[in-house]
Amino acid sequence: MKIGIVGLPYVGKTSLFNALTQSDAETGTYAAKKGWNIGSVKVPDERLAALAEVFKPKRITPTSIDYVDIAGVSKGDIALEGLETGVIAELREVDALAHIVRVFEDDTVPHVDGNINPERDIETIDIELAFADLGIIDNRLDRLVRELRTQNIPTLVHERTVLERCKEALEGGTPIRELSLSPEDEQSIRGYGFLTQKPLLLILNISEDKLDSAEEIRARFAASKRQIEIITLSARLEMELARLEAEEAELFRAEMGLSESALARVIDASYRTLGLITFFTVVSDELRAWTLKSEMTALDAAGTIHTDMARGFIRAETIPWANLVDCGSLTEARDNGQLRLEGKDYRVSDGDVLTIRFSV
Ligand SMILES: Nc1nc2c(ncn2[C@@H]2O[C@H](COP(=O)(O)OP(=O)(O)O)[C@@H](O)[C@H]2O)c(=O)[nH]1
Ligand SMILES: [Mg+2]
């Protein structure tokens, strides 16, 4: 899974990127307009530790998330740069966008529009993302109209209809994500990676001395952005905490009254936004976490692990992770009748421990 960090220059994107991925990319600069940073973070999961007590595996493999930190965009940038630039092309590849919004006040940090106004900044980026999509739609529609003049290809006619709907929505200020598209509609525009179609996470970057009122600030934005996940954090503080030893950082958090690490909240929200769940496997001494779209089946889970497993799927043995921890071992779970046998259509639940039986 890959998440693109977007936002105006000087809002804390690179600081958050560094905090999330334990990287050391340069902050406070707006030089490399075409550049981006990319880094990976292992998803912390307490369930893995609990399962490790049961299985005593030689190796524990968590899932990971990639974050892409693009150089800041300001008004007009995306539209002017167009589709071909590396930055936009990179963004089209991501699974979701995290938009960082500057709420923190700091006279030593410039703001491209002169003053702090998060509502305005959210709109600026929304409009830029819409422009980027509209640019592609207009180009494609031009070509489709020409092609359809000489021949009648049903798939292209369908694509044109969908693109026209998208265009109308965007021009009216509605992102593509809010349209109700059928699976066929989605399929016809999948290749474009429209930015306003991607799930969006709003991250409010607030001053470290305003963390007390984080919830109020969040509520203010939540009212107008109902369907969108909103997180508040202080990117600079998080970056500094990420550089400390784990125990030291914990102490700091406790002192400042911060319960959970902001990074864990970003990761949780990323999973929710993308509708992802985690399942676990234990194969030859390796305990491993995997990511799956919610609603997916045991067969999909098998395919995530290996195509052979999906091809030769026989059945899945499954148990919720907590039940397995209670039982103390798979054998015990089987004896207690807690290990269920499921077929390929079984809907995997978050936290399931799966053993796939297959033959090839
Ligand atoms: N006071 C304050 N400054 C911050 C915070 N987050 C980032 N900054 C500063 O804002 C400047 C821009 O940060 P950077 O992460 O490079 O932003 P980017 O341009 O969006 O990548 C740097 O000088 C950061 O130290 C914050 O939470 N509080
Ligand atoms: Mg930056």
Image (tube, rainbow, N blue to C red):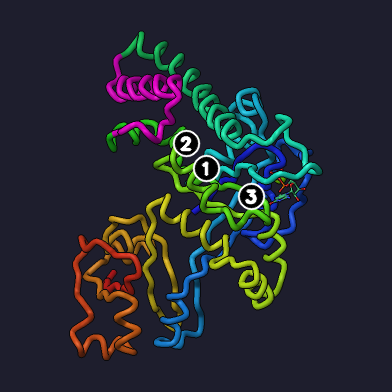
Q: Kindly report the distance in space between the C-alpha atoms of the residues bearing marks 1 and 2.
A: 7 Å
Image coordinates for residue 157, horizontal then vertical, percent: 31, 19
**Quadrant for the C terminus in the image:** bottom left
Image coordinates for residue 358, horizontal then vertical, percent: 27, 71
Indicate yes or no: mark 3 CB to ligand 1 under 8 Å: yes
Q: Marks 2 and 1: in contact by CB < 8 Å?
A: yes
- Amino acid type indicated by mark 2: Gly
Residue under circle 2? 193
Residue at disc 2, secondary structure: loop
Give me the residue at 70% from left, 37% from top.
Answer: 34
Q: Is residue 169 magenta?
A: yes
Question: Which-is-in-front pick, marks 2 and 3?
Answer: 3
Image coordinates for residue 259, horizontal then vertical, percent: 54, 68
- Magenta extent: 152-181
How many neighbours does mark 1 have within 10 angstroms: few (below 14), some (14-19), or many (20 or more)?
some
- Amino acid type indicated by mark 1: Glu
In this rendering, the answer to whether 341 lies above or below 186 is below
Q: Which mark is residue 206?
A: 3
In this rendering, the answer to whether 342 lies above or below 328 is above
Indicate yes or no: mark 2 CB to ligand 2 under 8 Å: no
Q: Kindly report the distance in space between the C-alpha atoms of the residues bearing marks 2 and 3.
A: 31 Å
Q: Marks 1 and 3: in contact by CB < 8 Å?
A: no
Q: Kindly report the distance in space between the C-alpha atoms of the residues bearing marks 3 and 1.
A: 29 Å
Q: Which mark is residue 93?
A: 1
- Amino acid type indicated by mark 3: Ile
How many neighbours does mark 3 have within 10 angstroms: few (below 14), some (14-19), or many (20 or more)?
many
